[in-house]
Image: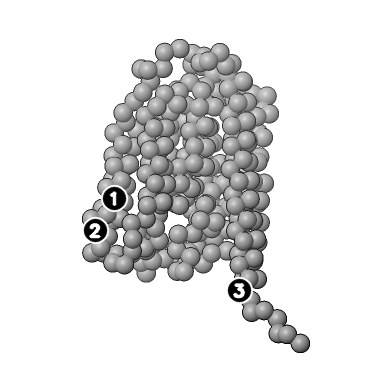
Amino acid sequence: MDLSYLWRLEPLPIAATFVALLFYTLGTGPLRRRLFPGHAYPTNKAILFYLSLAILTLTFISPLHTIGEYFLLSAHMLTMMIVIFIVAPLFLLGLPGWLIAPVALHPVIKPALRFLTRPVVNVIHFNLAFALIHIPVVLRTMMFSTDLLHYYTYAAIFTSAVLMWWPVMNPLPNDLPTPSYKTQLIYLIVMIIAHNPFSTVISFSNRLIYPWYGEVPRVFGLSPMQDQQLAGVFMGILYMTVMLIAIAAVFLRWVGGAARRERALPPPAQA
């Protein structure tokens, strides 16, 4: 199948990416010494930030997004998983705390951000947002009504994903509370358990949950049911894999922090 004609230069995601790129580049570059004196250029973080934008842009202009819109549920779910588990964490890891502090710590925004990044709140709002968007009638309306509503769907998922990752990737640990490592581990495990029903239902349903995907020409030889099952597999495997990596990273930070504190203790007094 020739996929070259499915590449699409969509103005809305390109414009949003350009605005984010512009603000980040100006804030960390020409305006840094004036607005954020004393801070060096965040090379490692900049690499992660620009990588997140590159992956996001490539995802939305590539055939993957077009196929996910019109032909395959599995391509749609893969797009969602890329946004949630690759783009969002890279984006958050790429944000220097000092760059976002003037906005994040504003007296109006700080209380709301403090509330929305609590682990319990995240478990509820992330899974609720994902569930509501993927109710068949809601998904069809948001994906096919207007371009603005279509990309609002992805913007909502992206924002929810950034908030979901915040408790374990807090860029402002000195100003906003970061859960203990134990709480972070429990939080990630609960997130796995809470999200598991979505992939299970899609993988093992004996009927088409999104019937319009069964009414379009077949792509890659997948039947509608095979496509739906593959969508569930993508959700389950990618979600579980990234969450287990996050759990391992948090555990290693916990162990490493304990070892550093132990080394910092004064030696026992000699008898």
Decide: few, some or many residues near mark 3? Use Cα within 10 Å; few <14, some 14-19, many ≥20. few
Tell me the kind of residue under disc 1: Thr
Which residue: 31% across, 28% down? Answer: 9
Gap between marks 1 and 3 measured at Cα? 39 Å
Q: Which mark is residue 249?
A: none
To which quarter of the image does residue 201 belong? top right
Up the image or down, 1 lies above or below 135; here it is above
Tell me the kind of residue under disc 3: Ala
Up the image or down, 141 lies above or below 157; here it is above
Q: Which mark is residue 31?
A: 2
Which residue: 62% across, 35% down? Answer: 237
- Residue 145 visible in rendering: no
Residue 52, given in percent of the width and then of the height, sits at: 41, 42
Up the image or down, 238 lies above or below 194; here it is above
Which residue: 53% across, 64% down? Answer: 178
Gap between marks 2 and 3 measured at Cα? 38 Å
Q: Quadrant of the C terminus?
A: bottom right
- Residue 218 visible in rendering: yes
Q: Which mark is residue 25?
A: 1
Tell me the kind of residue under disc 2: Leu
Q: Earlier in the sequence, mark 2 or mark 1?
A: 1
Q: Secondary structure at mark 1?
A: helix
- 62 or 67, which is in the foreground? 62
Nearer the camera: disc 2 or disc 3: 3
Check if mark 1's residue and mark 3's residue have beta carbons within 8 Å. Answer: no
- 22 or 69, which is in the foreground? 22
